[in-house]
Image (spheres, coloured by chain):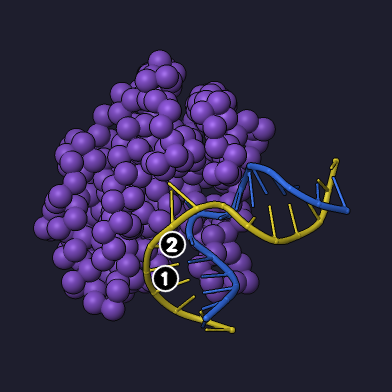
Chain colours: A purple, B yellow, C blue
Amino acid sequence: MKIGYPCINRSLSCKGNRTFRLRSYSDERLQQTIQNNLNCLLHILRFNLKYGMLFFRISSDIIPFASHPVCTFPWQKHFRHQFKKIGQFIMKNDMRISMHPDQFIVINTPREEVFQRSVAEIAYHAEVLDLMGLDTTAKIQLHVGGVYTDKSKSIVRFIDRYRSLDASLKRRLVIENDEKSYDIQDCLLIHKKIKIPVLFDYFHHTLLNNHESFCDVLESCKKTWAEKDGIPMVDYSSQKPHTTTGAHAEHLDKSDFKVFLRNSRPYDFDLMLEIKDKERSVIKALTILKSDPRLIS
DNA sequence: TCACGTCAAGCAGAT
DNA sequence: ATCTGCTTGACGTGA
């Protein structure tokens, strides 16, 4: 089990997700920002390695406006050596990488222009991972999307749209259960049709489920990850205390986390902690794992 | 230096 | 009809 956090490191001043406003766009500004973001990404990965955090989600902002028509600068070519260097660092240290395009990426949308923009954005994410030379265990995670008042039709649309994608994108994509529309059974159903791996989000599952046993869910999800996909990825968070909104906790809830670990035995997966204090929680989680060997599968 | 309105993009659910 | 949350944070203007 590798443990990690998404996108932002709160201990370092170096941020790998700097961006700017669209109206401030210039090729020069873009280059400066990308240069900063790539430098910081390597800093963050070095920091992570030092603490034994071997899983990381790269921010979608690493190349601002990458899929926007305004961006015509050939950043792929210009920064290719730096991408390669980062990729080599990742591979040399056996790190796991994911990316998570934001909420605007909806491949089951009925609107063709939204779909086209989504494909362009997914292609950009895949390009980043490809430029780093990472194998297909580096994943891009998506939600199934909208319901549009007819869930079964929307699932069919997801499947059809997915099938139409280029193989270079499909090999990176995984789907994740969400907290209000598509639960883990929906994801597993989609997997049956198109073999896309299913990323289990524990917190979303606590908010939307069919009272399945935790082990059954882990077993079912595990089977959706083929050899080439690597071991399953799992997202973990807990409820922010005193709220009922599904907001993510500020700090790792140690007792909830221990229950999670104990109940997830003997399954092995790479775990992303979606907790607001980011790497602090991962350090706590690693300490818990070390101090309680029976939690380790 | 700092407060705060706003930021490319979609959707669902609440108000 | 409008606002809020989502993996929310950060940009950038004006005081």
Amino acid residing under circle 2 = Phe
* Residue A90 in sight in this render: no
Residue A106: quadrant of the picture: bottom left
Q: Nearer the viewer, residue A295 or A152?
A: A152
Q: Is residue A68 visible?
A: yes
> Subunit of mark 2?
A
Q: Residue at x 63, y 40 (%)?
A: A10
Quadrant for the C terminus of chain A, please: top left
Q: Residue at x 28, y 35 (%)?
A: A137
Q: Point out residue A282 in the picture as x, y percentages from the top left corner.
A: 53, 42
Residues under numbered marks 2 and 1 in contact, where contact means CB atoms less than 8 Å apart: yes
For the residue carrying disc 2, how many other residues have a C-alpha within 10 Å: few (<14), some (14-19), or many (20+)?
Answer: many
Q: How many marks?
A: 2
The image position of residue A217, as x and y in percent, is 27, 61
Read off the residue under disc 2. A203
Mark 2–mark 1 Cα distance, whole angstroms, equals 7 Å
Q: Give residue A99's position: percent from left, percent from top.
A: 39, 42
Residue holding disc 1? A207
- Given residues A163 and A91, the one toward you in this image is A163
Foreground: B1 or A273? B1
Q: Residue at x 28, y 51 (%)?
A: A116
Where A125 falls versus A109 (above or below)? above
Which residue is painted at 32% across and 51% down in the image? A118
Which subunit holds the residue at mark 1? Answer: A
| Element under disc 2 | helix
- In the image, is A175 to the left or to the right of A248? left
Q: Amino acid at mark 1?
A: Leu
* Secondary structure at numbered mark 1: helix
